[in-house]
Image: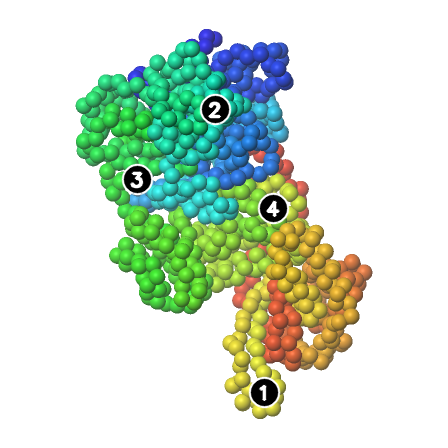
Amino acid sequence: MAESDLRPSSLPGLPGLPVLASPGPGHGHCLRRVTLTRPTFCHSCSDFIWGLLGFQCEVCNLMCHEKCLKTLQWPCSSMAPSVVRVPVAHCFSPAGHKRRFCSVCRKPTTEGNTEALRCHVCELHVHADCAPFSCADCRRAHLDVSPEQFARRQDTVLHHHWREGHLPPTARCQVCRRTCTSSDVLAGVRCEWCGVTCHSACYLSLPPGCTLGALRRLLLQPCCVLLQSRNFSKKHCYRITEGPPLLDDSDDVDAPPSVIIKDGQQGASESGKHSLKVFDGDDALKRGFFRSVLRSAKQEDVVGAALRAFHLPGRPEDFLLQEVTGGGGGGEAWLLRARRRDSEVVPVYLDWTSASSASFISVGVSNGSTAASVLEEVALQLQQDQKASAFSLVEVNMSSKQVQRATLSPQEKILDKLQEIRKVSLRQMNQTRLYMQQQEVQQQEVQVGLLVLGLPPLLATEQYMQLLQQHLDMKSHLVSVSHTYGSQGAVALQVSCFSEAERLFMLARETVLDDERSLTSLLIPHIQVQQLAPDVCPLLVFVNPRSGGLKGRDLLHSFRKLLNPHQVFDISNGGPLAGLHTFQQVVQFRVLVCGGDGTVGWVLAVLESIRHKLACREPPMAILPLGTGNDLARVLRWGSGYSSEEPLQLLHSVEEAEEVLMDRWTILLDHQDLSVENQEGGEGGGDHFLEPPKIVQMNNYFGLGIDAELSLDFHQAREDRPDKFSSRFHNKGVYVKVGLQKLSCGRSLDHLLQLQVDNQDVPLPHLQGLIFLNIPSWGSGADLWGSEVEGRFGKPRMDDGLLEVVGVTGVVHMGQVQSGMRSGIRIAQGNYVRLTLRSAVPVQVDGEPWLQLPGHIIISAAGPKVRMLRKSKQKQRKSSSKDVSRSESPAPTEGGRR
């Protein structure tokens, strides 16, 4: 195939605006024959290239066999903006240490001196200096429309979202059934919704519709989620807080380092005699962003090299170079400009929020063409009944970090506008589209949902409105309160103006109330529950990134990619309320909590306080253990800790888990001065409360004495040096060290407290610790109650409505229980417990310790039992190509199982 046949095809007279709306013969690669000096694999078929000759793209470094030239389908990075269906910006953050390949230059992200970036939502990996050449082709996780506009939509088909490279080791092509993955190059493509894998030469043979694959029942389909985000950054939309921002989100052009090195060349300051500094527009010149290209005797060769360096399609004869006076930094500096013509052909895309928006109408424009005349020509070609005045021409910039749009005035000259964009940046021109949009859509009713947290609890709705009006200067005619969560100190707002929503969102995050409470604001999507299939039970995921060292953060990143990011919540950013409020109207859903026992208790407590406002009042809950003890996770068969199991396999286990019931208990801690009460007698005792009673919820166990004292010392040590407690192994070592220090300093509890179980006094033997068990696991998996059968006690269960009261004689006894050599001292079983403390005693509830002052403690059942998910004993399905192959099969009927 001749080299001219392999160059990108462009619209006549319009440099940088490609004709093709889908890859094919116009894939855009500039291929040349090269001599191979090391073992190389084909990026198209993933096979080894035998021999010394291959074909390499001069723009994106794609390498392929000669036999693969005719079947080459995947577009070059210079043509990537032309195949985007719906522009969606990426959420970049620093990448991990795994070996990945840059989607722009196809080189390993570990090569070079620049930082590697990854997207939180999709499998895009790029070098920091390659990020400006990537476009807004992220997964679309929601529809940016109002409910009224959604009701008029007809494009409900979800298309595959293909991403090249980083396939599982066992991946096979869905079309030809051959291996399509490679660990050496960026090869093979994968749908980021259903997981189907193919060769890049085969993926167009599959039907365009996506079935969401093996996780269909757990996924929130994008067409079911509405979020009018406008100019909110994607990190705000997905509630992403980890890590500092890479760049200011307000910048409409990405600003990489000032000196960019191309193809291993030295900077222009060191080799100015052999290279030129080329800028692609005034903005790049202002920011000092240039590319180095080799000198050549022909200007056309230099222009062609500059186009390839900036990943731009087009013919060199349509561009020219202008010398920059005082380029600075040594070496010659030149500006790459597009030649202006008196007439061009402009593609005008249809509705930019539609899944079929990759189709366009080609319109010829001249010096006198305005936005109104272009719309008339498009309406004429479409043969629409509506007048052109009912539409507007919208300019959409598809930058990889921010998708921005602006409406053109009807009198604006099109050629002048295009020349203005090209003068600013040719890269920006390559990532800019013109869309035809109905004016009534632009004037649609705005409904932006905000959740404001950190307010004083237990106030009336009018009081919350007054408080927000005082601190945020809220415009009452634009803002209304949709929900109030008094127990959590939070309100949900509906804002009918984008600018007011953005102002409230940013101002609330910077506001501190009079009592030094800091407010938090979150952007909340709206779920169209009527669009959910009857057999779909979406999964709500809470992840504590501070648990399990760095594993929590990695799991948060993995679940955002496997599921819809709108169903994955960082619990350290707003707590569990944000997720439960988002799923408020969902009739059935499941919950996955990734964290320790304290995180699970936090979610259960919030769920208990707002369950009357949920359509699904008792969602079953699974646990991914990331804490130190993880006793509840052990009982429910989720294991003693996260052992790097594949996140996809974990999701399958959650879907197949069985529901069980678990008791919850309320603990009333009433601090009183018992010495005064004893002196003055019954009636006067009620006047000596030192503080209001405290109420806490218990799920696992409640302890007094030596075990709580060890937990308190460990907690204080962790508070002093939190950076040292990053692994379960280290945490257990600190527990052992603290226990050794308490070998000879324990106090007996028999004279410090009085115990009543079911209104019966229970005498206590000589003990240093007293534990009340709800589950048959304590202290990281120890069986404190024991397995021996005793006539006066029944076999303990987590749903029997009874607490087991067990005692330990000291640290040595606790160590023997931990090692399985001995069990605790059985004292009683009952459903109502009353304790009288005569002195201050350390206590703990589910691992959260404190020093409890003298008074009364009452333990009783806390309302209805909660539904938990217990991992199935059956052999779990492997996360392999077997699941992937099923993802294209027809969806099962309602109530069926895979």
Cα distance in 3D space between marks 4 and 3: 43 Å
- Where in the figure is residue 186, as x and y percent of width and height? 55, 25
What residue did someone put label 1 on? 677
- Where in the figure is residue 52, as x and y percent of width and height? 61, 11
Residue 557 appears in view? yes
- Residue flagged by tag 2: what amino acid is it? Ala
Q: Residues within 10 Å of mark 4 (few under 14, many from 20)?
A: many
* Callout in the foreground (1, 3): 1
Cα distance in 3D space between marks 4 and 1: 51 Å
Element type at mark 1? helix
> What label does residue 551 carry, if any?
4
Question: Which sits earlier in the primary sequence, circle 1 or circle 3?
Answer: 3
- Residue flagged by tag 1: what amino acid is it? Glu
- Where in the figure is residue 162, as x and y percent of width and height? 48, 29
| Residue in view at x 41 percent, y 42 percent | 248
Q: Residues within 10 Å of mark 1 (few under 14, many from 20)?
A: some
Q: Is residue 157 above or below residue 60?
A: below
| Residue in view at x 51 percent, y 47 percent | 242
In the picture, measured across the screen, residue 876 lies left or right of residue 545, that is right
| Residue in view at x 71 percent, y 69 percent | 706
Question: Which sits earlier in the primary sequence, circle 2 or circle 1?
Answer: 2
Q: Quadrant of residue 405?
A: top left
What residue did someone put label 3 on? 152
Q: Is residue 433 above or below residue 701?
A: above
Question: Which sits earlier in the primary sequence, circle 2 or circle 3?
Answer: 3
- Residue flagged by tag 4: what amino acid is it? Lys
| Residue in view at x 57 percent, y 57 percent | 600
Display coloring: rainbow
Cα distance in 3D space between marks 1 and 3: 71 Å
What residue did someone put label 2 on? 268
